Image: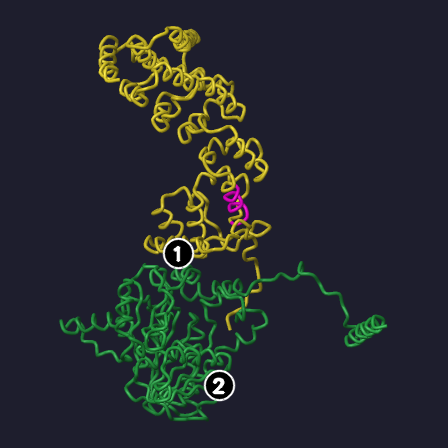
Chain colours: A green, B yellow
Amino acid sequence: MAAPIVRSVRELMRLVDFALVPRRHRHKKKWAATEPKFPATQLALQNFDMTYSVQFEDLWPSIRVSLLSEQKYGALVNNFADWDCVSARLEQLNAKDFVSEAISHWELEAQSGHSAAPSPAYSPNLRCFTFARGDVSRFPPSRLGSLGVMDYYLMDAASLLPVLALGLHPGDTVLDLCAAPGGKTLALLQTLCCGNLAANDLSTSRTGRLQKVLQSYVPQDIREKNQVRVTSWDGRKWGELEGDTYDRVLVDVPCTTDRHSLYEEENNIFQRSRKKERQMLPMLQVQLLAAGLLATRPGGHVVYSTCSLSHLQNEYVVQGTIELLANQYSIRVQVEDLSHFRKLFMDTFCFFQSCQVGELVLPNLMANFGPMYFCKLHRLT
Amino acid sequence: VLNLHRQIPLTWVCLAKLMPHLGEQKRTAVSLFRKLTTTSNGEGLEELPLIGSKKHVQELKCRADLVHCLPEKQRLSVDGGPLTLEKVVCSLLHMGFSDAHINELLSIQPHASPQQLLDVISEFILLGVNPEPVYVALKKSPQLLKMPVGQIKKRSSYLRKLGLGEGKLKRVLHSCPEIFTMRQRDIDDVIQVLKEKCLFTMQQVTEILHRCPNVLQGNPSELEYKFQYAYFRMGIKHVDIVRTEFLKYSLTKIKQRHIYLERLGRYQTPDKKGQTQIANPLLKDILRVPEAEFLAKTACSSAEEFVVFKKLLAREEEEEPESSTSTEEEEEEEGEEEELC
């Protein structure tokens, strides 16, 4: 009795299904033979070959092989853990804290009077261990320390540079406009300078990850005392939400994530279906940077950063935004010179020598960090 | 044994003193005889006039017979001792070995009878191999001296059947003396892989054995993988695999250099029509050149970067799941090229 009913229902369903698509639109789907399928990683590589070989000329092959090979990591020591113990353990692995190395090296030179360079403004208290040039050792996964928080955070060491460049002072009010997955936000907290930190990211799933990172690295009382506020708003509207508020703003925008796009198929920005989105990226980046600048108080600083090599997403965005702010809001913004920064960390990273504004870390097999572009902006009015 | 050792230098010094001129003459004669045998398979008849007049040739043939007969005669003499040793040294000199070489040859296997040594060596000389390569091969793999002569004969006739005639055998013996000592089944396995799995023609197989004899030493399944890597991953056709002696290089070296070039963007796997968007470097510039030259001219990269790359690649291979035997074809083809953003 039941069987015929089921069958007739199924029959009906099929009829309905047919009825939904008008006969004139019904067609037999073509098989893959006529429609070549390219993995998005392949498309990304083709795209890079086209644009970057022009942009970087002779440097491109070396960057290419580095992007396609395993990247290096840095271990950001958690200051809320037993940090000197952790540092000692990392030193035993033959890793060195590249920040303190660079600073002490610079101080030595300053004492001997070789360089008359001004004291570089960098965010204090950051300790990040890396292996020497050409050393391909890996860090063991981070462990839960005795104080109930993880002892270090593994991240691309170049990601620390934007935070270092931001030059935090104790008690600063800080905004991280595109915070997830949380490496840079954590680094901002590690400076122990944030009087107030607002961490925002548009996607709630990504802010979820950010929350998790903060929970496992930062004790609860500090999270509350520092008033870490995690939000999921549209960063582009920040200028209207909280204009002229922050001392320091980090704008680490969504980009083509060059290294990531070359090996991760899932959610790849180079998928055909995301072409429009990709083409709109520079526009989005300009809007986010503009919002970041608007949220800064006059006299405050903004660091713009991407992990892309593309000029279109780096220098052009910075220059475009400065122009936009000058024309539409009559706000004067100045690019800060970071060449001393480049000299400071020359031993650890391979910098691109001819950026018009900002600095760009190029991946290199000897020091396979980056790509990382960062540019420091000073809001004058 | 001690006694024997003391005698050797004495004997050859005496011999050398007695007939220095004679010895030299004979050496030249034997070297000419060698040419004769190499050409005697009929392919290189045009080389004959170089040797000299017909009369001279006939004379040489007589001497060749002499060389051939000597061991047989000696085989009849029952006991070893100084007499046989002297005769062995004498006939080795006859074949064109230098005094120093003979001395060394005799000391390779002090326990083996000099008669055995002479038998084995004369077998190789008859195969058309020069004294020098014979010496090198024996020095490299002394176990050859332990082989029964019958087995050497059998193996060499088999190698002839494979197409490794007199001239070609020299190179094979030089780089892979094991071809005489290894098991017949192992040789057959390699040949079967080349013929049936890699689909080389018999002529190509002969050529491969001649040019890259070390394929015999390797594992047949590794050989097959190496072929597949060349054919599918690098897009090299059979003819070129043979011509460029591809199979003689180690898979590690091939992968290191090829993948390095590929990631640098200097090598592309050809598509179905054999086309690439960039001009690939020649195979000889990738594999045959020393590393410094490869880096300077082909890869245009620094040595320190390549060192790091090799470390990274080794780790990648190590950590890769065991699926690498399946071929990874279909690299990039012409796709829609879009401007970035």
Q: Residue B181's x, y, as percent? A: 44, 27
Q: Quadrant of residue A167?
A: bottom left
Q: Front-most of A258 and B59?
A: A258
Q: Identify the residue at image location x=56%, y=34%.
A: B192
Label 1 resides on the chain identified as B
Q: Quadrant of residue A14?
A: bottom right
Q: Residues under labels 1 and 2: Cα distance?
A: 39 Å
| Left or right: A57 as drawn, with respect to A115 | right
Residue A265 higher or lower than B328, as above or below: below
Q: Is residue A243 visible?
A: yes
Identify the amino acid type marked 1.
Leu
**Label 1: few (<14), some (14–19) or many (≥20) C-alpha neighbours in 10 Å:** some
Q: Identify the residue at image location x=39%, y=76%.
A: A183
Q: Which residue is outermost to the left?
A: A112
Q: Is residue B53 visible?
A: no
Q: Which residues are magenta?
A: B224-233
Q: Identify the residue at image location x=33%, y=68%.
A: A351
Identify the amino acid type marked 2.
Ser
**Label 2: few (<14), some (14–19) or many (≥20) C-alpha neighbours in 10 Å:** some
Residue B225 lies in the magenta stretch: yes
Q: Residue B134's x, y, as percent? A: 37, 23
Q: Front-most of B124 and A79?
A: A79
| Left or right: B170 as drawn, with respect to A378 | right
- Which corner quadrant holds the N terminus of chain B? top left
Q: Specify the label residue B170 is tagged with.
A: none
Chief secondary structure of the magenta span? helix
Q: Identify the residue at image location x=50%, y=40%.
A: B223
Q: Residue A68's x, y, as percent? A: 44, 61
Q: Which residue is mark 2?
A: A232
Q: Which residue is mark 1?
A: B312
Residue B3 higher or lower than B234, as above or below: above
Label 2 resides on the chain identified as A
